[in-house]
Image (spheres, coloured by chain):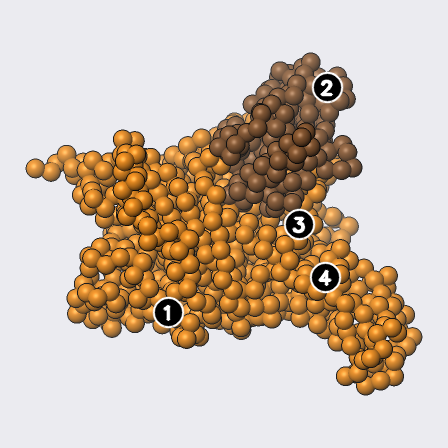
Chain colours: A brown, B orange
Amino acid sequence: MVNGKEYTTDVEQRTLLVDFLRDELGLTGTKVGCDTSQCGACVVLRDGLSVKSCTVLAVQAQSSAITTIEGLSDDAQLSPLQAQLWEAHGVQCGFCTPGLIVSLTDFLQHTDDPDETTIRAWLDGHICRCTGYQNVVRAVQQVIGTLQEASV
Amino acid sequence: VTDHVFGAPIKRREDPPFLRGEAQFIADMSMPHMLHMAILRSPHGHARINRIDTRAATRMPGVVRVITAADLEGKLMPLPCIWIPGGVKSYFPPHPYGIPGAGAVLATDRVRFVGDAVAAVVAETSAQAYDALEVILVDYEVLPAVVNAEHALRDDAPQLHDAAPKNLNALWVCGAKESTDQAIANAEVVVSQRIVNQRTINNPLEPRGALGHYDPSTDEYTLYASSQAPHNHRFLLATLVLGIPFNKLRLVSPNIGGSFGTKGYLYPDMPLVLFLAKETGRPVKWVDTRTGMMHSTVQGRDHIQYGVLAGTRDGRITALRCTSYANLGAYPSTIGPGVATAMLGRSITGPYAIPNAFCEVYAVFTNKTPLGAQRGSGRAEATFLTDRLIDRFATAIGMDPAEVRRKNLITPDQFPYDNGLGWRYDSGDYPAMLDRALDMINYAAMSAMKAEARWRGKRLGVGVSCFVAVSGVGPSERMGKEGLLGGAWESANIRIHPTGEITLTVGSQSTGQSHDTTFAQVAADELGVDVAMIEVLHSDTKRDPYGQGTYGSRSFSVGGPAVKLTAQKIKQKICKVAAHIFNVAEDAIVYEGGQVYVKGAPEQAKSLRDMAMTLWYGWAISPGMEPNLDETTHFDPPDFNYPCGAHAAIVEIDEQSGVVDLVRFVAVSDVGNVGNPLVIDGQVQGGIAHGIGQALMEEGVYDDEGHLLTNTLLNYPMPRASALPNFELDRLISPTPHNALGAKGAGEIGAIGAPAAITNAVCNALAEYAVEHLDMPMTPEKVWRAIREPRAADAPVRQRKDAP
């Protein structure tokens, strides 16, 4: 299951999930930035939790529900996280952006009231060469602030 | 419509596709019947190729073609080098046109670095192409290698190129040698330091890629590539590598995932995918891996410098001398030799008024990956040298290092200031920037902070760096003298469509710099229309006006003025036609807020769309006037521009572990007039992070045989979020007189001051251990050793063991 749609197909045993998503399904929003699971550009959600899809074989994802950046962008409207990244100028070249958004979606769903240290520690799974992370952190803080206001 | 679109913090218009994962980078592109290429690279730093056997590879599943240098003979020329050390004799590998060569597309009889391209395979899938590489048999005869630039100049060093005796590309000099030597000889105080500004790897997050297409019906090639200089690369590839007419090659850059200097170079993969597309009759795509990129994409810095600074006991600097050994790697990269010489040498005095200065640079070939530019290159190494020496000088005379800087900074009344080395600084208030940075970091309270940190078991240090950074490469004539075999202008075209929408097309290329937003702001401001009315195009060489490329912080400060000048032409034409239509003199016409009207009668205004339609039909325009609104400007600046800044850092060092914690970082910048503060601050932040990476963690480490030991992101650390504090930014504005926007470069400056500020802070924190200098990166081990064995911190282990 990828982005809510079920696929039945044969894949080579060695095919990585990221290559399957990009090459077989054409879901090129998931990026490949390294070959050692360091950069985080390829993060997708597997059953709601973030994984680096370069470190998962496609066959391992059998029976899993995978969500990619495309799956998080179904609405005409941007998600609160996407919108705040835009507001805070959290994007420059944009190559790390999809991975960051998918990963932070998991983070925001599963972390209660994170402080800046916690946000930065989570971002350690990603490399961004453009922004120095400052505006990405600010965007996450804005999302948390907005969510809290909404719940009051 | 707002009156102040220029300078407004408008959020980027290009962002939604990136946020939604829809933006296409080179790796995301595909074409029908496309093949995939993989490149076999040398595993040796230096070796002779005796034989290559590709027979097994050609029989592998899915393989369509396997090629080596023999297949390219007479078909692809070597790559050219187009920025050579200016004004001195220089030595290069050959090129059939007699211009400086940069090495064959595929290695012929010798490989000279780990990563040198040896063969290429084209197959139905990428995996099949990589599989086939495994069975290409290359009989290598390994030769002695040399990786250190000083060693490479020795008589007994292995020789890399027949055309470059002793591995010397050039000895480049600038400044006044005699007076500098004399001033040093007569000085009251002299400090000297050997500084290794380490090899760095740029690592933009997107690996490079290329997709070649050939259309036999028109005999036309198309190259899609992650190129930050598409027009220039088109020219070089067509005329100097493929040997085809300029107009038979179209180059298109898709979205580019960062560059920081690396994607402004020609690489073997670019002509290879074109050659193979024609050979196979099918599109050929190649995308690098991270490890492949770390081996074969140009790297940065890598100077061994011997710096000498002389001055008086009361803190006046009288002379500065630098001898630098620049490690060019195995081949001259496209612009590497020029960057490694002029951009460093002319910059060594920084923002300081130093009466005597001299710099010589030995540009040397070694068995490392070719050297290119990295964000701030040349200027960053110069700033590091001088700001380290100033701290050493301050210690020697017992004066506060900030006070020494204040005493020697060029003052605002001295502009334009000739630094005696080739730069003519335009504007700024260097002392005010230093004072602001010191104020922000609370410099006056430093001793109390140090004492407080001691209670917590930490050594606290503060460091400062002041810099001025030549940016906005141009004018063309000057760059010709500087050794650039090319122009240095930029361009813009504005078309106002009959329906009123506006298309702005620029010759410069975004690699993440926000062209779509900031260039639209320039045009919208001048034309008095909403930014949303303007679309910005670039990156297609068959559609766009030409440009020379995005490098040296020149997109906005050279390309931006071209946009403004073009918008002015459009306005002038509209006013002229309006005068004709309203039947009044031209000076009676007012252009305001995207409308024209006769002075005193704004209620009868005509909109931009009315005027565009009028000019589109051409029925009622002035006699002799050309119809339509379509104007182009090529802007060649009268001089460079000179952004400047002051950085201050506070570090805390854990004596037990040697870990350096960067606690605060303050950056005061002056980039002249600001087009979009969000964009400028974002670039400064990114640059600072890049500089912190160099200061604390990054180094491309090679063994003696030329193997890159830090060849993945596992062993080449880069700054991650938790290693960085929130940067505290401030800005002064002194417009440059060198362009219509008053804008200076901004993309590189963050990376220029940060390394010196942080290293000064670390040495300041370790003052009690008499640590005079530490080379970057200041890893925990290096700092830990410095604390324990202070005076021998930089000496090789062997020497310490042998010491009595």
- Please state if B712 lies on the left or on the right of B570 as rendered: left
Instruction: Give the CA separation, mark 4 to mark 1.
Output: 38 Å
Q: Which mark is residue B2?
A: 4
Q: Give the SS element for disc 2.
A: loop
- Please state if B650 lies on the left or on the right of A25 as rendered: left
**Residue drawn 62% across the image and 60% down it:** B7
**Residue drawn 66% across the image and 34% down it:** A149
Assign the N terminus of chain B to one quadrant of the image.
Answer: bottom right
Q: Amino acid at mark 3?
A: Arg
Few, some or many C-alpha atoms within 10 Å of disc 3 (few <14, some 14-19, many ≥20)?
many
Q: Amino acid at mark 2?
A: Met
Q: Nearer the viewer, residue B705 or B396?
A: B396
**Residue drawn 22% across the image and 55% down it:** B395
Please state the horizontal and vertical placement of residue A35, each as a whole percent of the image.
53, 30
- Please state if B81 lies on the left or on the right of A98 as rendered: left
Confirm whether circles 3 and 1 share one chain.
yes
Residue ID for mark 2: A1
